[in-house]
Image: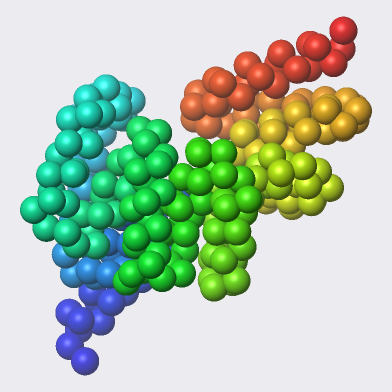
Amino acid sequence: MPAFVILFVLVHIVLVVHLLHRHRQGGWLLLVLMLPGAGTVLYLLLMLWDTVLRWAGVPASASQGARQNADPEAELHHRRASLAVADNLINRLALALACLKYGRHEESAELFQSLDDGECRDDPLVLLGLARSQFGLEQFQSAKQSLDRLIAANPNFRSETGHLLYARSLEALGDVQDALHEYQVLTSYSRAPEAHCRYALLLTSLGRPGEAKALYQALLHALRRAPRQYARSHQWIALAEREIAALAA
């Protein structure tokens, strides 16, 4: 086998692992898996561009802010127009992700469902997108069922986002003990502030304030030792501090 092919395969494997580890948007991972050549090149170019921006001293928040401040309707119109011109997997997935991003859960649910009914049957990223859309529509039982299917069809797939969504779905359905168990397992390996805060909120609602307070304090202590994550977690820091004060009153 030519050395170039071996090198390309190794780069592709490393990139897939990198995407899974960093929890990048599902669209990139699916693109790299289904189009290993073009997808890998595109993502490497994106990483190179981000590196150039950092080298030039452009803060990441500035470039992200510019994208976030873009007109949602303009992006959605662009995605819909692309799909109308070429109804293919990539365009449908791109529109589904954009709808999910901007809270158009009904449309994103329809798109993810069409992908699951077609060429992406039981794909974990598609099922996760479908479950997120269903949760946004307050269809908690459907969201749980989609996640159950994901787990059954992809037993080796791991996603903190999916695990948190599963715990929240159980909580919303009133399955408190199962939700507690899922939160406990999730927070044993995840450092996501939202997971810890939602677990503590559930404990408080069940009359277990001591355990909830300990969770909040441990979270704040961990975040203060990780400045970058601390800077991105204002919402959950404020909630933890507010809840600690309320529990002490």
- Vertical order, 210 against 172 (above or below): above
191 vs 55, left or right, is right
Number of disc labels: 0
Residue shown at 22%/29% (left/top)? 73
Instruction: State the quadrant of the C terminus.
Output: top right
The answer to which image quadrant residue 93 occupies is: bottom left
| Residue sticking out furthest to the left | 85
Residue shown at 51%/51% (left/top)? 131
102 vs 42, left or right, is right
| Residue sticking out furthest to the top | 249
Between 167 and 236, the one nearer to me in the picture: 167
Between 168 and 243, the one nearer to me in the picture: 168
| Residue sticking out furthest to the bottom | 1
Give coordinates of residue 77: x percent, y percent: 17, 36
Give coordinates of residue 56: x percent, y percent: 19, 30
The answer to which image quadrant residue 204 occupies is: top right
Between 234 and 208, the one nearer to me in the picture: 208
The answer to which image quadrant residue 205 occupies is: top right
96 vs 71, left or right, is right
43 vs 158, left or right, is left
- Vertical order, 84 against 58 (above or below): below
The image's colouring method is rainbow
* Residue 57 appears in view: no
Instruction: State the quadrant of the N terminus.
Output: bottom left
Residue shown at 78%/47% (left/top)? 175
Give coordinates of residue 35: x percent, y percent: 22, 69
- Vertical order, 138 against 26 (above or below): above
Give coordinates of residue 90: x percent, y percent: 23, 58
